[in-house]
Amino acid sequence: MELILALAIGVLGGSGVWLLMRPRTFQVIIGLSLLSYAVNLFIFSMGRFPVGRPPVLEPGTAGDPAVYADPLPQALVLTAIVIGFATTALFLVVMMAARGLTGGDHVDGRARDR
Amino acid sequence: MQQLTILPILLPLLAGAAMIPLEERRARLRAGLGIGSAVLQLAVAVAIALQAHGSGGPGMVTVYRLGDWPASFGIVLVADRLAALLLVLTALLGLAALVFSLARWQRMGVHFHALFQFQLMGLNGAFLTGDLFNLFVFFEVLLAASYGLALHGSGVARVKAGLHYIAINLAASLLFLIGVSMIYGVAGTLNMADLAERIAAVPAENRSILEAGAAILGMAFLVKAGMWPVGFWLAPTYSVVSPPAAAIFSMMSKVGIYAVLRLWLLLFGAEAGASAGFGSTWLLAGGIVTIGFGAVSVLATQDLSRLAGASVLISSGTLLAAVGAGQVTVTGGALFYLASSALAIGALFLLIELIERGRDLGADVLAVTLEAFGDGDDDDGELDDEVGVAVPATMAVLGLCFLCCALLLAGLPPLSGFIAKFAMLTGILNPAGLGRGPVEVSPAGWGLLAALVLSGFATVLAMTRAGIRSLWATAGRSVPRVGLIEIAPVLLLLLCCATMTAAAGPLMRYMQAAAAELHAPQGYLTGVIGRAP
């Protein structure tokens, strides 16, 4: 479980960083999305991985923290996903505006002359 | 008056939300709402500051528990001297920028006023919040609004700069999240005060994870503050955004500084056990390098807005290095410098647009040509005679304002910039307090001292040159038409700086008390946790 999650975070994060360095806006936005998936998984993993334990209280079992998963990282991930979603949408709009204004999809407006 | 603490967040939230359904043509109503909200925020901020300062003794830390949960479970807002100071500055700059925008800029795009209110809300929230995750949320609020404001007015230059700005800040937000979750994974809490208490007890094998988390978190703040290797986005972005947005952005880079100041002194202060003082060398060195980079870019630039952007860098570097120096008196001086430089840079951003208005196309090219051929400057006396009489009232007012900005930014007497730098230098040279103990200045202290003085010199040079080029050189420019409502905010900000100079005594006591509170955060901890630590 740990290994799979660690590999997933690593692969997503690595591809995200690689794409973030690319010169086309589309690559940058996909890179940012992949990175944010990696980060969300990372936050989630900071609550450890208790399998089959609910994060919300159930009647009768309240009072024993060992029965529950830590709900806080899950709440954090939820907030982070929502915020990431909104900012990515906004970035997409700016990207399209830049495409319209400069006529290219290079992050600097146009490719540097070689 | 505990309830006051939530008002700086609620007021702009409600005002901003009320503006969205209003139609575009109800511009007057929107502007009225916006300015009314900013004035109220200023009043509330001043009230909070007075409350926090009390009679000048150990300050009262007002803690506002949302939902009345105890601090380690619920969310708290904390108003102490530092938070109150930054609230007042935000409200002042916000008010000035809003009044400035009335003349022209509010009509350059949609939802300017609503975005501006949300920006203020994010700033106020970030200064007040007492836990790390809400700090992230308020950072995102202020960034989301700033993305809108950065693009306000549209145009190729803004969209291009905005693209870089958004990408970099999204990446920085991801770093923020990684840092926060690493700290949570080790310490099991996100409340800053709770964290500060637990940090000494973190087992040795987890300490490196905690420190790595704090360092990653710090990177997110330093990107906002514009520290050297991660601050290249700052000057290009700030120089193209619309002037009211740039004025409030100058406060935004102070949020990064605030977060470093608050968290670093709280978490890695003297009580942090093995982690005490973690990263201070990096802050100090990074700050000094940032000052150097800022000084070089101030000298290198031809463009007034770039010059203002570069002076934001100098200001950030100075503050970071002063925080890194880790002495109460230096921090106190740095807080005074923060207030003075935030107001001065805000005024400069607004002023530049007024000056640039008179510039014709091609004047830039002319300036470059003049530089290349070494023309001009030989016939000083003649120049004085010719232009000294002919300066019309508009140019005289603009010139005077520019002069004040230059004095403030360079730290020359008689204005508050000088007092701020003087206070910092005194702190560096007298680590044990003025006239007490032996004077032993560390090499890093000498480095900071040199950086402060040299950056002031570079600013004087650059501002003088820019002033001569843009205010005295008559070629290729006409007298700009400047409305009273546009110059009034600049005068307001400069007047605040003048007041800071006149009332330097009480204000400096406030700053020193705030710094003492930061370096010995027992009052903060007791206030938030609700029992003696």
Image: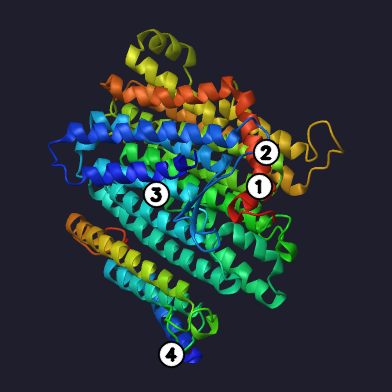
**From where the camera sits, is residue A111 visible?**
no
Q: Circle 1: is it few (<14), some (14-19), or many (20+) Cα within 10 Å?
A: some
Instruction: Name the disc covering residue B122, or none.
Output: 3
Q: Circle 4: is it few (<14), some (14-19), or many (20+) Cα within 10 Å?
A: few
Give B314 or B320, whichever is nearer the viewer.
B320
Measuring 37% from the left and 48% from the top, which residue is drawn there? Answer: B237
Give A65 or B485, whichever is nearer the viewer.
A65
Amino acid type at circle 1 is Gly
Residue B366 appears at what percent x and percent y?
A: 33, 32
Q: Residue beneath label 1, please?
A: B523
For residue B197, side relative to residue B255 (left or right): right
Residue B255 appears at what percent x and percent y?
A: 48, 48
Real-space CA distance between mark 4 and mark 3, rounded to the nearest whole angstrom: 38 Å
Labels 1 and 4 in the same subunit: no
| Chain containing the residue with disc 3 | B
Q: Check if mark 1's residue and mark 3's residue have beta carbons within 8 Å.
A: no
Real-space CA distance between mark 3 and mark 2, rounded to the nearest whole angstrom: 28 Å
Residue B282 appears at what percent x and percent y?
A: 64, 57
Q: Check if mark 1's residue and mark 2's residue have beta carbons within 8 Å.
A: yes
Q: Earlier in the sequence, mark 1 or mark 3?
A: 3
Amino acid type at circle 2 is Pro
| Chain containing the residue with disc 4 | A
Q: Earlier in the sequence, mark 1 or mark 2?
A: 2
Amino acid type at circle 4 is Gly
Measuring 39% from the left and 30% from the top, which residue is drawn there? Answer: B370
